[in-house]
Amino acid sequence: MHHLICAFALLCTFPVAFAQQKPLNPDISLNGLIHYQLGSQGNTPNSEFKNGWSLKEAELRITSNLDAYFRGDVTLAFEKAEETLHGGEEEYHIEPEEIFVETLQVPGVTFRVGKYLLPFGKHNELHTHAFYFIDAPLSQSALFHEHGLSETGLGAYYLAPTPWFMEVSAHANEASNEHVFGTGTNDDLMGLYHLKNLWDINDASTFEWTFSYGHGRDQDYQFNHIYNSSLTYKWRPVEKSKNTSFSWTLDASAAQNSYGESGIQQGPINAFSTWMIYQFDTNWWAQFRYGQQNFKTDSLGATEKNSILVGYIPTEYSAIRLQYDLIDDPAEAENEQRGTLQFNFSMGAHPAHAY
C-alpha cells in the first residue's frame, strides 16, 4: 500500500514538474533555401551567382526567454564558403548571423547586447529567407554587399510616448564591415542611430518613415559616414474575405566612402531601390523592383537593376518564387540577365517577422 501511495504521488507531481521545465525548452526552427539559376554570366569563373542547382543557405534559429529578465536569440547560417563562390571545391561553413540577449524588465527601454543585424533602412534587419525578393536590393548590397550590416555591440531601443508609433534606437558596435568601415582594430567602434515612425492612415492603410545614420573609422583610419531613409506604404482591405494586399517602398542609402572586394577605395557611393508587392490572390504574389547605384568618382554612369518576381506562397512555412533580373552595368559590354527559381521552406516554431 505504501508503494502505491508513493507511485500515485509521483504521477501527480510529474505534470507539475514537466510544466515547470517546459519554459526552459527554447523555440527551434530551421529554414532552407534551394535555388536553380540560369544567367548570362552564370558560367564565368568569378561569378558569385553560378548557374544550376545550389543550396543557398540553411538557417537554424533558437529563441527563448532565459528568465523573467532576459531573452536570448541565436541564428546560425550554413552557407557556401567564399572559395566555393569563386569556383573552388564546394564547401559550407557556419556563420553566426545573430547571437544576442535583450532585456525584458527595464522600464521604457530595451537593451540588446551581442551580434545582431542593425536597424539600417528597411531591409538590413531581415534574414535571407525573409527577403522581399530573392536577393538584397541595391540600396543595401551596394554599401554592405549581400550579408548586410551585422555587428557585435550594445544597443538601446526606446518607444516614445507619442500618439503614433515612434521608436528611437542608438547602438555602439564593432566597426568590422570592410565595405564601409573595417579598420581591423578591435577598439574602433561605429555608432548608429535609427528613427522609425509608423502612422495609421485608416483601417486599411499605414505609412512608415525611417531614418538611419552611422559613423566609424574606415580602412584608411578616416571617419566614414553612412545614411539611409525609407518610405513604406501598406494597404490591406478590412474585409476578411478579400485576400489581397499592396505595399510600396522607397529605400535610399549613401556612404561618404566605400571599398570593393579587394579593399580598393571606390569613393562616395549612393544607391536607392523602390519596389511594389501585390498580392492578387490567396496564395499568389506579383512584385517589381528597380534599383540604381552610383559611385561619384565613376564617369561611366550608374548601375541599374530591374527585377520581376512571381511567388506562390501556400502557407507561412513554404514558398516557391521565380525572379528575373536585368542588370545594366556600364563597366560590362553587355547587360546581365538572370533567372532564379527558389524553394523556401521552414520547420519548427519560427518567431514572427517584423511588420
Image (spheres, grey):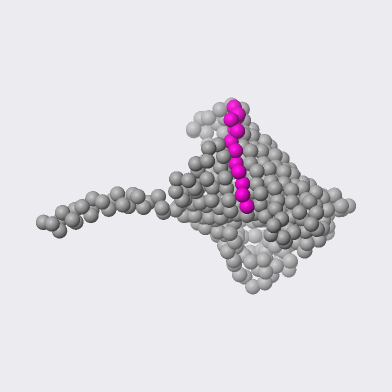
Foreground residue, 244 or 236?
236
Magenta residues, start to end? 153-165
Q: Position of 122 compared to 5: left or right?
A: right
Image quadrant in which you'd find residue 233: top right
From this view, report whether residue 57 is shown above or below residue 240.
below
Image spot of residue 214 (x, y percent): 72, 46
Q: Position of 206 compared to 211: left or right?
A: left
Outermost residue on the right side: it is: 299
Image spot of residue 258 (x, y percent): 78, 54
Quadrant holding the C terminus: top right
Quadrant holding the N terminus: bottom left
Residue at 23% from the left image edge and 54% from the top image edge = 10
Image spot of residue 301 (x, y percent): 85, 50
Residue at 64% from the left image edge and 66% from the top image edge = 81
Foreground residue, 286 or 228?
228
Q: Can residue 90 be seen in this view?
A: yes
Foreground residue, 112 or 243?
112
Magenta-drawn stretch, dominant element (helix, strand or loop): strand
- Decide whether residue 6 is among the magenta residues: no
Q: Is residue 337 visible?
A: no
Residue at 56% from the left image edge and 42% from the top image edge = 110
From this view, report whether residue 205 is shown above or below residue 355.
above
Foreground residue, 25 or 199?
25
Residue at 71% from the left image edge and 55% from the top image edge = 188
Outermost residue on the bottom side: it is: 89
- Decide whether residue 164 is among the magenta residues: yes
Image spot of residue 77 (x, y percent): 57, 59
Image quadrant in which you'd find residue 160: top right
